[in-house]
Image (cartoon, grey):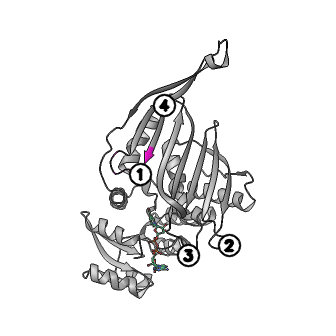
Amino acid sequence: MIRVGVIGFGYWGPNFVRVLRGLPDCEVIGIVDARAEALQAAGSMYPGIDLFRGLDGLLDAGVDAVVVATPASTHFEIAGRLLDAGIDVLVEKPLALSVEDGIALAEKAEAKRRVLMVGHLLEYHPGLMRFREMVRGGELGDLYYLYTTRVNLGKVRAAESALWDLAPHDVSTIRFLTDAVPLHVSAQGGSYLRPGLPDVVFATITFEGGVVANVHVSWLDPHKVRRVTLVGNRRMAVFDDMEPVEKIRIIDKGIDTTEHYESFQDAIAERIGDIRIPPVPIGEPLKVEAQHFLECVRDRTKPRTDAQNGIRVLSVLEAMDASMRSRGATVGIRAHP
Ligand SMILES: NC(=O)c1ccc[n+]([C@@H]2O[C@H](COP(=O)([O-])OP(=O)(O)OC[C@H]3O[C@@H](n4cnc5c(N)ncnc54)[C@H](O)[C@@H]3O)[C@@H](O)[C@H]2O)c1
């Protein structure tokens, strides 16, 4: 039986407690939160779970693995303390707020032989996993470009920008779908609610081989959109997570060109074929993610979204941040083995 603790019982932490309690071979033994109201809420929902204001109480209670669902600015310190204490850790996205801190955590986990996983939730989404098989299986032909849209009204974060809050999902999704090596980025943002903390970001990543990806995130938008669009030379595809059932669309559209032609119009032919909506496997992504974490803890294996995966995402986010600060200048992405 794996003894698990959850740190952070705000918006997201309760979801972890719920899914972990539904999984076999694990027991949620403690919840930590710095706020008394959060612990009060936890106590009335789960009277059998011990509650702590700080980390020490949870460590004293004897815990094997911990989920960190606190604000991103606290991830480095909390995850570091847990690893030092010899605990396996699943830290919510982003792993940390800099590549340097991400590397330090990875090294600590390595030295202590502990599991360090980052909660890149979409890599555990059964629908996106199916979509990935189709994209990587060649359904679209060669990939030309892709773009992601993650916009909504709220939730505005106290300390991080929309880039660090929302874009980890998109950057991890893009890498999950293509595995292309990102070379450089150019990003522009707008800070309307508070100076220095962008609420909206438009970022473009260029990959080895010429594939281009655009990432649009915002918490100041009239629409709620969670969508990835890919355009290949054979087909196009959309993953729309706001669709309750029909999340994947494979669209047989394209522009065919010929080399020998008399007029330009003869050379360009629009191809408008069928739209296919394949069935998507059912399953709660957070449950799949939590299950994977417990398997890694039990079997002493590396998670799919391990620290290296987290650092690769941080290196893109860091470059986007630097580009925004220099008003869209192209910034190279550091490669991390
Ligand atoms: N994967 C997803 O889809 C998803 C969705 C939402 C949030 N998240 C992530 O989950 C994390 C938490 O987000 P949230 O929306 O729940 O934030 P939140 O602000 O609603 O809750 C955070 C909680 O952590 C507590 N806290 C803060 N510092 C603490 C400390 N040092 N020790 C103990 N408790 C502390 C706060 O009191 C609060 O209750 C963030 O990293 C966020 O990026 C992920």
* Residues at marks 1 and 3, CA–CA distance in whole angstroms: 26 Å
Q: Secondary structure at mark 4?
A: loop
For mark 3, what is the residue? 158
What's the residue type where badge 4 is placed?
A: Arg
- Please tell me whether residue 164 is drawn above or below residue 216 in the rendered image: below
Query: Measuring 46% from the left and 38% from the top, which residue is drawn there?
Result: 237
Provide the secondary structure element on which disc 1 rests.
loop
Query: What number of labels is visible?
Result: 4
C-alpha separation, residue under disc 2 versus residue under disc 4: 42 Å
Instruction: Write down the residue under mark 1.
Output: 241
Prevailing secondary structure class for the magenta stretch in the rendered image:
loop
Q: Is mark 3 within 8 Å of ligand 1?
A: yes
Crowding near the residue tagged with mark 1, few <14, some 14–19, many ≥20 C-alpha atoms within 10 Å: some
In the image, is residue 244 part of the stretch drawn in magenta? yes
Q: Amino acid at mark 2?
A: Pro
Mark 3, residues whose alpha carbon is within 10 Å: few (<14), some, or many (≥20)? Answer: few
Write down the region rendered in magenta.
239-246
Contact between labelled residues 3 and 1, with CB atoms less than 8 Å apart: no
Which residue carries the number 2 mark?
A: 195
Residue 1 visible at all: no
Residue 34 sits above or below residue 113 on the image: below
Badge 1 vs badge 4, beta-carbon distance below 8 Å: no
Residue situated in front as seen by the camera: 149 or 291: 149
Residue 53 place in picture, x, y as percent: 42, 86
